[in-house]
């Protein structure tokens, strides 16, 4: 995946776009994570990024970048279909890695605490509702 495409994917978008992405991420994040858990080497960081993206204290631009990356992660169709073992999530990992590099330092300890709790509370990683 080239840098231009990743840069385009990670555009934070306007407020309406961020709301659409937030809705999509909230709806699909946990089922997709459950399928990807073994293939994504940084699941804890991914869940912490989810909580950071939904945190109203996170700066708007950072939320936008994270929501764009997480929305790409949960899309059913992307560059490399996710059902291909070992390579299916490789494009998602590239996008998420780029997003994490762009927002370094904004995922706080409380996001990691929430991630650890969510991953420990439920066998599928989805927090109890």
Image (cartoon, helix red, strand yellow):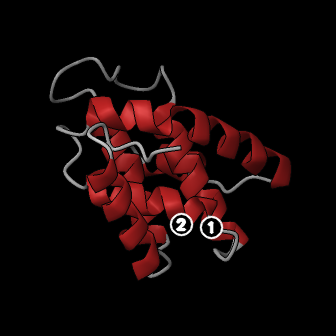
Q: Secondary structure at mark 2?
A: helix
Residue 35 versus residue 122 in the image, above or below: above
Under circle 1, the secondary element is: loop
Is residue 30 shown to the viewer in this render? yes
Judge left or right: residue 89 versus residue 30: left
How far apart are labels 2 and 1 at the CA level? Answer: 5 Å
Query: x, y percentage for residue 49?
Result: 45, 61
Q: Residue at x 48, y 39 (%)?
A: 29
Whether pointer 2 and pointer 1 mark residues with C-beta atoms closer than 8 Å, the reply is yes
Left or right relative to 25: residue 32: left
Nearest the eye: 42 or 129: 129
Q: From the viewer's perspective, is 128 left or right of 93?
A: right
Task: Look at mark 2 in the image and give the residue it sits on.
Answer: 52
Please name whichever residue, 24 or 110, is drawn nearer the observer in this view of the structure. Answer: 110
| Relative horizontal placement of residue 121, taking residue 54 as reference (left or right) | left
Q: Which residue is mark 1?
A: 55
Report which quarter residue 113 is drawn in.
bottom left
Q: Which mark is residue 37?
A: none
Counting from the top left corner in percent of width and height, residue 122 is at 32, 44
Q: How many marks?
A: 2
Q: Quadrant of residue 39?
A: top left
Residue 1 at least partly seen:
no
Q: Kindly identify the residue that appears in the image at 48 percent across and 48 percent down.
A: 6
What residue appears at the point 59 percent right and 48 percent down from the top-left corner? Answer: 68
Residue 24 drawn above or below residue 93:
above
**Quarter holding the N terminus?**
top left
Residue 87 coordinates in the image, percent (x, y): 20, 29
Q: Position of residue 15 (x, y in %)?
A: 83, 54
The local crowd at label 1, few if under 14, some if 14 to 19, many if 20 or more residues have their Cα within 10 Å, is some
| Residue 89 in the image: above or below residue 126 | above
Q: Which of the 4 quarters of the picture holds residue 26?
A: top right
């Amino acid at each position: 995946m080239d840098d231009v495409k990743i840069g385009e994917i990670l555009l934070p978008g306007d407020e309406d776009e961020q709301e659409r992405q937030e809705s999509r991420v909230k709806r699909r994040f946990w089922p997709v994570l459950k399928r990807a858990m073994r293939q994504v080497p940084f699941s804890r960081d991914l869940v912490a990024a989810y909580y950071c993206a939904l945190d109203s204290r996170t700066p708007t631009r950072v939320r936008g970048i994270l929501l764009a990356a997480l929305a790409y992660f949960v899309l059913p169709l992307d560059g490399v279909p996710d059902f291909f073992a070992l390579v299916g999530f490789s494009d998602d990992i590239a996008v998420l890695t780029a997003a994490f590099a762009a927002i370094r330092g904004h995922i706080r300890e409380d996001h990691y605490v929430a991630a650890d709790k969510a991953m420990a509370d439920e066998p599928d990683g989805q927090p109890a509702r």
